[in-house]
Image: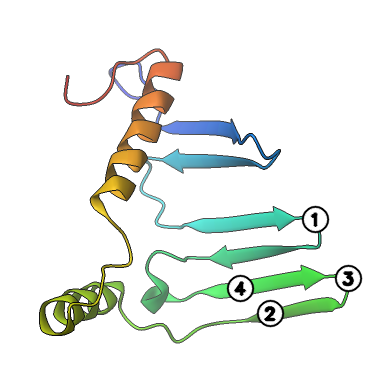
Amino acid sequence: MTSFGRSLTRRANGFAPSGASGSVACTMREERRALLRVVGRDGRLEVDNPLSPQRGNQFTIETAGGRTTGSIDAGVSYRHMLRAFADHVTHGTPFPTSGADAVGNMAAIDAIYCAAGLGPRGT
């Protein structure tokens, strides 16, 4: 808890009409670790540090066929964003994400705050 009586962590679960489900957990603690875990009918993918892979990363893929573990030399995240911008300006290449993606992300974040008994941020 913070001095304001608020938790530093949040967890939310979601379900899609297709039957798929997911969860997200986050913290405002000083930990600098991100973990992506995807579990499907035929296997599982886990990626340690998908947000800033230049600081070290590891992935694990598990299926009935076995387990593969490794890391990716992905470079700096900002470099990928800059390259997408330059490709768009120079060649008209569409951006990998859109404003609708950002609006959808903020709607999900607002819903998590509301479920926790807090109002949406910025209001």
Q: Quadrant of residue 23?
A: top right
- Residue ID for mark 2: 69
Question: Quick check: 72 left or right of 80?
Answer: right
Q: What is the distance, in whole Å, between disc 3 and disc 4 at their CAs?
A: 17 Å
Q: Disc 2 or disc 3, which is closer to the eye?
A: 3
Identify residue type, mark 3: Ala
Q: Which of the two residues, 85 or 91, is positioned nearer the viewer here?
A: 91
Element on which disc 1 rests: loop
In space, the residues marked 1 and 2 are separated at their CA atoms by: 19 Å
Q: CA distance from mark 2 to mark 4?
A: 6 Å
Asked whether the beta carbons under mark 1 and mark 3 sit within 8 Å of each other, the answer is no
**Spot occupied by residue 123 in the image (x, y as percentages of width and height):** 17, 19
Of pointers 2 and 3, the one earlier in the residue sequence:
3
Q: Secondary structure at mark 3?
A: loop
Q: Indicate the amino acid at tag 4.
A: Phe
Residue found 61% across the figure and 42% down from its top: 22
Which residue reaches farthest right?
64
Residue 43, compared with residue 81, is above or below; it is above
Q: Which mark is residue 64?
A: 3
Q: Earlier in the sequence, mark 1 or mark 3?
A: 1
